[in-house]
Amino acid sequence: MITNLDTWLTVAQNEKRAESFISRFLGLMGRKRFPEACDALIFKRCSSIHCFFMRMEIDVVFINRHGRVVKTFSRLKPWRVAFGGPQSRDVIELPAGTLERTRTKPGHHLKFD
């Protein structure tokens, strides 16, 4: 579970980590919606993503090594690229609308259970 400690709202209940080369490479490519088994996809040691070959919008959160939100992209469209910047260490892909629902913004702190 991922919780925003600044708003005390749940960002994701069932996150999945993309750890293997194949899972990192494929990510959410070709999907029309998030898999039912998860509502967040986490990429460790990743400071940029692309939405090539995706068929849906997503919310993207870049965090630093302390879990602090560095940068966000709301409703990132397919065929776009997002960069987290030099402080970014990990990235979380979420269903579109999650950032708005949880009021997650740069500077907020995320807790992983």
Image: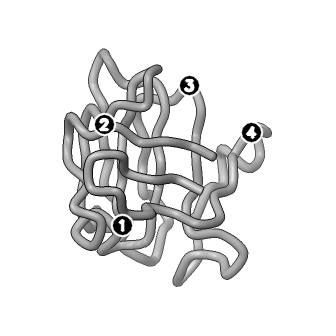
Label 1's element?
loop
Give the mark, 4 or 2, whose residue is nearer the N terminus: 4
Residue drawn at (53%, 83%) of the image: 32
Marks 4 and 3, how far apart at CA = 10 Å
Marks 1 and 4, how far apart at CA = 22 Å
Label 3's element?
loop
**Which residue is at the front of the view, 59 or 69?**
69
**Which residue is at the front of the view, 32 or 64?**
64
Marks 4 and 2, how far apart at CA = 21 Å
Inspect the image, locate mark 3, and give the three-letter code of the amino acid beneath it: Arg
Marks 2 and 1, how far apart at CA = 22 Å
Residues at discs 1 and 3 in contact (Cβ within 8 Å): no
Residue under label 3: 45
Residue under label 4: 19
Give the mark, 4 or 3, whose residue is nearer the N terminus: 4
Label 4's element?
loop
**Residue 103 sits above or below residue 20 on the image:** below
Inspect the image, locate mark 4, and give the three-letter code of the amino acid beneath it: Glu
Residue 26 in the image: x percent, y percent?
Answer: 66, 55
Residues at discs 1 and 4 in contact (Cβ within 8 Å): no
User: Which mark lies nearer to you, 4 or 2?
Assistant: 2
Residue 2 in the image: x percent, y percent?
Answer: 52, 53
Give the mark, 3 or 2, whose residue is nearer the N terminus: 3
Disc 2 crowd, CA 10 A, few/some/many (<14, 14-19, 20+): many
Residue 95 badge = none
Residue under label 2: 69
Residue drawn at (34%, 37%) of the image: 109
